[in-house]
């Protein structure tokens, strides 16, 4: 029973939180020769929720 009170008390004092996560992405590389490489990183995020908070 005391755990139920502790849980209720904890939930009462919880502040709203917001997380902005990357939805997906791709990492590629290309050998240009002579020991040189080109690395490309593409990341995707949800633009709809990004500016709301």
Image (tube, rainbow, N blue to C red):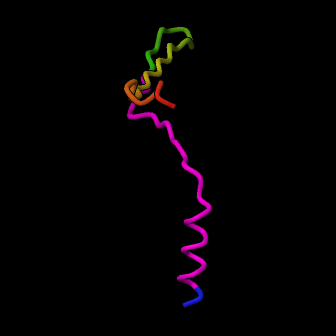
Q: Quick check: is 24 in the magenta stretch? A: yes
Q: Which residues are magenta?
A: 3-28
Residue 40 percent location from the top left of the image:
47, 18
Q: Residue at horizontal 51%, vertical 41%?
A: 19
Can residue 25 be seen here?
Answer: no
Q: Residue at horizontal 54%, vertical 74%?
A: 8
Q: Quadrant of residue 29?
A: top left
Tell me if 43 is positioned left or right of 5 in this view.
Answer: left
Query: In this orientation, which residue lies closer to the viewer: 22 or 13?
Result: 13
Q: Quadrant of residue 7?
A: bottom right
Image quarter (top left, top right, bottom left or bottom right) of the N terminus: bottom right
Query: In this orientation, which residue lies closer to the viewer: 7 or 28?
Result: 7
Residue 43 percent location from the top left of the image:
44, 25
Residue 51 percent location from the top left of the image:
47, 24
Query: Height in image: 28 above or below 36?
Result: below
Query: Height in image: 4 above or below 47?
Result: below
Q: Quadrant of residue 48?
A: top left
Can residue 44 be seen here?
Answer: yes
Residue furthest to the bottom? 1
Residue 30 percent location from the top left of the image:
43, 16
Tell me if 12 is positioned left or right of 21 in this view.
Answer: right
Q: Quick check: is 42 in the magenta stretch? A: no
Q: Residue at horizontal 52%, vertical 42%?
A: 18
Q: Residue at horizontal 54%, vertical 49%?
A: 16
Query: Height in image: 31 above or below 49?
Result: above
Query: In this orientation, which residue lies closer to the viewer: 8 or 34?
Result: 8
Query: In this orientation, which residue lies closer to the viewer: 5 or 45?
Result: 5
């Amino acid at each position: 029973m005391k755990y139920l009170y502790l849980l209720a008390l904890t939930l009462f004092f919880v502040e709203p939180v917001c997380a902005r996560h990357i939805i997906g992405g791709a990492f590629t590389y290309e050998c240009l020769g002579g020991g040189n490489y080109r690395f490309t990183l593409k990341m995707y995020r949800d633009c709809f929720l990004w500016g709301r908070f």
